[in-house]
Amino acid sequence: MTYFDALYLFLMLPVLLAVYQLLPKRFRWISLLAASLLFYWSLSGRLIVWVLLASVWTWLFGLLIARSAAERKAGGAKKTLPLSPAALRNIAVAGLLGTLAVLKYTGFIEMNIGRLIRLANPAYQITWKNFALPIGISFYTLDAVGYLVDISWEKMQPERSPFRMLLYLSFFPKVMEGPILSGGALREALFAGESVRSGNLAHGSIRICWGLFKELVIANRLAIPVNMIFDHYTDYHGAVTAVSGILYALQLYMDFSGTMDVVIGSAELFGIRMPENFSQPFFAKNASEFWRRWHISLGVWFRTYIFYPVSLSKPVMKWNLYSRKKYGRYVMMLGTSAMCLFPVWLANGLWHGPQWNYIFYGMYYFVILMLETALGPVRKKAEKRLRHAKRMHLWNAFLILKTWIVIFTGEMFFRANGVRAGFSMFASMFRGFSLRTLTDGTMLRMGLSETGFTVAFLGILVVLIYDICQEKHLIPDGRLGRWETPVRWTLYYALIFAVFIFGAYGAGYQKVDMIYAGF
């Protein structure tokens, strides 16, 4: 069962809403826990044991960290816990990340060690283990780590109930693809037991339909030519290869943001507001802004738990003092940025999966962001000159176009079947480049008909118009509630019928996996 299955949409959600509303307020969270465990079991079967163990581990160490902090704050000679809060936190975090590393990266490490051995001994046979990977482990592990670190920083109190801790980590709308959270507001909302309200039902249902539109009408159609080009990349070159990066970036955006729409809409049915994970990323004017708009919760997590701690670490502080006196502010800024950004983008690449192209993808953005930092003074001077000129809009258009090139190139390497394939595709773009290959029928030999391309293109156009309205603040909070009732309901019905008429599903339809569920 996934978020786009009829079983989830037309059975699980309605039944859960009814049970949730019928239960007394203080017990409603139990229905969410039961549904979350059932949902996760349907995804991972016996692998549900890993999220159970992670929940118990996180709950226990959360209590121990808080207790140790309280004992040291109270003073006195009597301490029941010999370890400091920081030591307990480090043990707990090491256990969570160690489990993730063993399950997710063991085969990758063994394979690369084997390749190194074969350089000296070509007869050596490469063998490696691949463990069954629980769905969502990368997401709930970061949730748990953030929770433990927040407790050690005394930003929040630990959860006293292991069952509540389990619900926090396994809450069904977020367990597959996030958003990644840390403590606070969601915990309160999960256990508040607010009654089901008509406004929440209406907004949540429309948000779910919007996610279905992105996934079923656009993403699943684009998956067909994307898979064809990337799986047979040696057969294509020029404009077709260039378009592959664009198509995959659009597929990924429609898939991931569409899933987030269903996730956020599902939670809103129960009065639970989850944070947004996207904010019109293709309107970004540079790579840094793009990552503040794309997968926002992951960026916030890396910034909070890696970037800031590294920037305040002793080595970085010593570098700041030394380099500022020795080389000046500019060199100091570059060195500090490099030391803080490198672990962030290495972690970003590794987080996505045990493949070299993901690591390359992280390093790609590290280099891009360092270049943006180095050229920052030049950009500021240019913008200062253009600020009061009529050409400023042309400058902004240039910046957005430049960022698109960065994004589409990065996504080509991200999706490619390895780093070598990524470089091969990148090089092939400049061989025999001609826009005629996009209109001579080549694209129609990739499994998607002309009608399919037309539907996908019109769907992208609809999403673009919606995103422009949001960017221009014409749709407050992403909702149409302030628009006139006839206009609003016309758009609602148009969306619903578009999903039913143009959605990719039914007999003969090959199910497409949700992309980020694989990370």
Image (cartoon, rainbow, N blue to C red):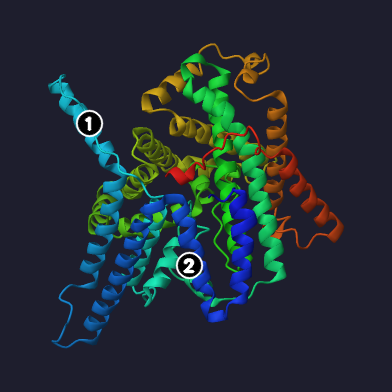
Spatial CA span between label 2 and label 1: 40 Å
- Above or below residue 26? Residue 52 is above
Residue 49's x, y, as percent? 34, 58
Please tell me which residue lies in front, 117 or 384. 117
- Above or below residue 81? Residue 39 is above
Q: Is residue 309 visible?
A: yes
Q: Is residue 395 visible?
A: no
Tell me the tag on residue 33.
Answer: 2
113 sits left or right of 509 in the view: left
Please tell me which residue lies in front, 50 or 108. 50
Please report the residue visible at 13 percent of the width from the left and 87 percent of the height from the top. 77
Please tell me which residue lies in front, 323 or 49. 49
Please report the residue visible at 60 percent of the width from the left and 38 percent of the height from the top. 219
Q: Crowding near pointer 2: few (<14 within 10 Å), some, many (20+)?
A: many
Residue 183 sits in which quadrant?
bottom left
Q: Which residue is mark 1?
A: 127
**Element class at badge 1:** loop
Please report the residue visible at 50 percent of the width from the left and 53 percent of the height from the top. 296
Say what amino acid the circle numbered 2 marks. Answer: Leu
Say what amino acid the circle numbered 1 marks. Answer: Thr
- Above or below residue 472? Residue 428 is above
Residue 320's x, y, as percent? 28, 54
72 sits left or right of 219 in the view: left
